[in-house]
Image (tube, rainbow, N blue to C red):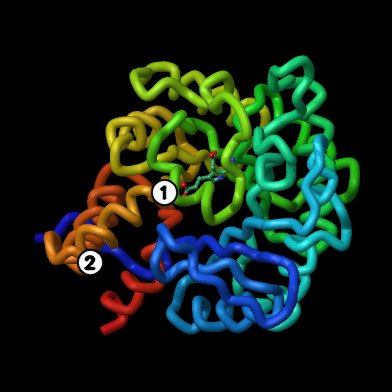
Amino acid sequence: MRETSLSPDDFIYPLFATFGKNIRKEIKSMPGCFQESVDRIVKHAKEVHSLGIPSVLLFGIPEHKDETGSSAYDPHGVVQKAIKAIKDKVPQLYVITDVCMCEYTSHGHCGIIEKGDVKNDPTLELLAREAVSHAKAGADMVAPSDMMDGRVEAIRIALDEEGFSETPIMSYAAKYASAFYGPFREAAESTPRFGDRRSYQMDPANRREALKEVSLDIEEGADIVMVKPAMTYLDIISDVKDAFDVPVAAYNVSGEYSLIKAGAKLGWIDEKRAMMEVLTSIKRAGADLILTYFAKDAAKVLNK
Ligand code: PBG
């Protein structure tokens, strides 16, 4: 009678690539998640694959940050190296890359800054260069998370021009300006130095605007659309699923993960049950894919 069932096949597991060798540094606010050098990330990728999880989402923590985030499109950048190494050693694992500037800019914003403001249009070219450099390194799919207007189209055109017309785009289409990204910003070392992301991420109070954002991204060429965060936006996942006929992804973000981990550590919540309930609710709401730091823990439960 059960209407909704989970499978490790539903999950995408985020990984954080950092420079150096033999580094595996646990992220304090995200127990069980690590910043890892390329050699260690490959081992981790093997473990993910062996659990039946088909895909990973890669983030990079570069050695060098600057105003224009030049490490983001450096062919020898940390993400580019991690993509190559994973595709070389675990070719069956589907590698998606997060395309954004915030991990690579000295100011921590997702776009180019001019006179104290994030500038939409000049950012598009850099995002397109970043996406192409990921595809050249072997990425199977790119996932722009910056929320600049027009970036899906800019990336689609650039990929096509460079011979990557088969590389799909999963857009972070309805991405809200959320307090639940806090722990991630420690993980990716991408907290903005000034201001916040409310000029480009969505207002949590808006529901219809999500449909507009999603439809624009689909028009521009998005193959999969994402709603983010997940737990506090189940209504949005459901709306998007009903209104469009492309696959819907939902990002069960860092803060959602950390809250359950913290509650469990204090003995206030049953971690396993809470985790499975949250993931089930995201799928029940309509998500075809779930990006989650719980992927490995949940796969272990499901594989039993
Ligand atoms: C980059 C990006 C963020 C997340 C994914 N990609 C952070 C942000 O927008 O501040 C958040 C992921 C999470 O919290 O787990 N723009």
Q: What is the x, y in percent for residue 234?
A: 29, 37
* Circle 1 SS class: loop
Q: Specify the quadrant of the image occupied by residue 218.
A: top right
Identify the residue shown where x is 44% and y is 38%: 227
Give the image quarter of residue 199: top right
Task: Describe the element under mark 2 as helix, strand or loop.
Answer: helix
Q: Amino acid at mark 1?
A: Val
Q: Is residue 159 visible?
A: no
Distance from Cα at disc 2 to Cα at disc 1: 19 Å
Q: Give the mark count.
A: 2
| Rendered-image quadrant of the N terminus | bottom left
| x and y percentages locating residue 259 in the rendered image | 28, 53
Q: Residue at x 28, y 62 (%)?
A: 261
Q: Which residue is mark 1?
A: 253
User: Could you classify mark 1 by the number of other residues whose Cα lies within 10 Å: few (under 14), some (14-19), or many (20 or more)?
Assistant: many
Query: Quick one: label 2 or label 1, which is nearer the N terminus?
Result: 1
Residue under pointer 2: 265
Which one is nearer the viewer's eye here, 227 or 74? 74
Q: Residue furthest front?
A: 193
Q: Quadrant of the C terminus?
A: bottom left
Mark 1 CB in 8 Å range of ligand 1?
Answer: yes
Q: Does any portion of residue 60 appear in the rendered image? A: yes
Is residue 178 toward the left or the right of residue 55 in the image? left
Across and down, in percent, residue 270 comes to: 14, 65
